Image: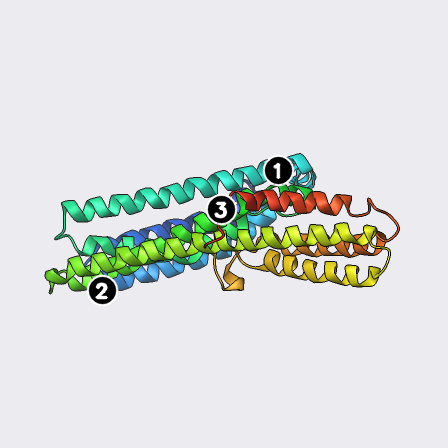
Amino acid sequence: MSLTHQVTAGVRIHWRLVILPVGFVLNVWGNTLFDTSPDVTNRAVSLLLFTVGLFLALYGCRFWRSRAEKWYALQRVSRWMSRKRNDTAWQHRWWRVKVTVWGVGVCGVVLYAVRLVNGVAQHPDQVTEHAASAMTFMYVWGLLPMWTQAVEPKGASTQQLLEDTGRRIGRAAIGRTVANTAGIYFAGAVVYMLVFPSRPALLIPAAVTLGAAMIATGHKTWTRLRKLSTQLHTHIQTLERDLAMIPSSQDATREKQDAARRSWDAVQRDLWTSVDTGYGIFGIPFVPRETARDLGVRTEQAIEALEHDQDAARDVLIDLATIKEACSDRIDSVA
């Protein structure tokens, strides 16, 4: 083999790895040029650079991925992560990290909203600078509830999920309140950009209206939580009494069992109801559906066994008491 082939062998083998960083650089360059250049021609060129760079970056990922599969260090890390993914302790730690990040994100949104109000108060004439804030609040409004759903633990036991019920419904209400507030902020920023330059006198009525809407939506979310908690607490008490009546009844056992089943149906409907919104697809139920189904199966088994075993419902009653404890701090009989 000639000296030229020996020198260029590595380049000929690994040249495809350059595609990803080159695409990334072109993408960033096009994005920066689009923001800084007012000329239409330069913006067209920047849009082309942005598109080509994005395509090259996505295309170059495949070569880095195939190369990474041969790295023994990455293989060891991947096997270690696979083992830890199924470990209960690590799952709990990962869930705590997600909850912490969620809490930091929610606090960041609140601080950003306060900063926006201060910015408008100090520089009311800088209308166009608030366009980015409007888009940010629009994304928060749409994505924060889904992020709150994603934070919930996956694969945890029924007991762990029930013990976390109080914190779970609290996170759901907080997430929905902040998301609704962000949506009103988005509407306020849009109204501010459209109204203030031409009709500044309408700014105060619009601000008062949006402020009232913010208070009303937040109040409705927490009222819904208190009402659902009170209703669920009442239905659990009824179910507990019906379960206690089954072993003590010598006659009409079937009627007592049917009464307990009807009481469980009411409890199950409450457990399936979304805490933060009436739209189930966008809301978080009081407990996960799988947990409610598991509790329902064990409740039915206890109803059948209580005729012969007075302690058959002991575990079910413990779980119901855990849920009832989560409801007790939010009871409001006049909600």
Along the horizontal axis of the image, is 170 left or right of 289? left
Q: How is the image coloured?
A: rainbow
Q: Quadrant of the C terminus?
A: bottom left
Q: Residue at x 31, y 45 (%)?
A: 112
Q: x and y percent of residue 102 in the render?
A: 47, 43
Q: Is residue 95 above or below residue 270?
A: above
Q: Which residue is mark 2?
A: 41
Q: Which mark is residue 171?
A: 3
Q: Amino acid at mark 1?
A: His
Q: Nearer the viewer, residue 319 or 206?
A: 319
Which residue is drawn at the image coordinates 50% and 61% (left, top)? 282
x, y percentage for residue 98? Answer: 52, 41
Secondary structure beneath disc 1? helix
The N terminus: image quadrant: top right
Numbered disc total? 3
The residue that disc 1 covers is: 92
Disc 1 to disc 2, C-alpha distance: 54 Å
For label 1, the crowd category at 10 Å Cα-Cα, with few meaning under 14, some 14 to 19 and many 20 or more, is some
Within the image, what quadrant is residue 249 found in? Answer: bottom right
In the picture, measured across the screen, residue 113 lies left or right of residue 169, that is left
In the rendered structure, are the residues bearing label 1 and label 3 in contact, judged by CB atoms less than 8 Å apart?
A: no
Residue 50 visible from this viewpoint: yes
Q: Residues within 10 Å of mark 3 (few under 14, many from 20)?
A: many
Quadrant position of residue 9: top right
The Cα atoms of the two marked residues, 1 and 3, are separated by 17 Å
Q: Quadrant of residue 300?
A: bottom right
Specify the amino acid type for callout 2: Thr
Neighbour class for label 2 at 10 Å: few (<14), some, many (≥20)? few
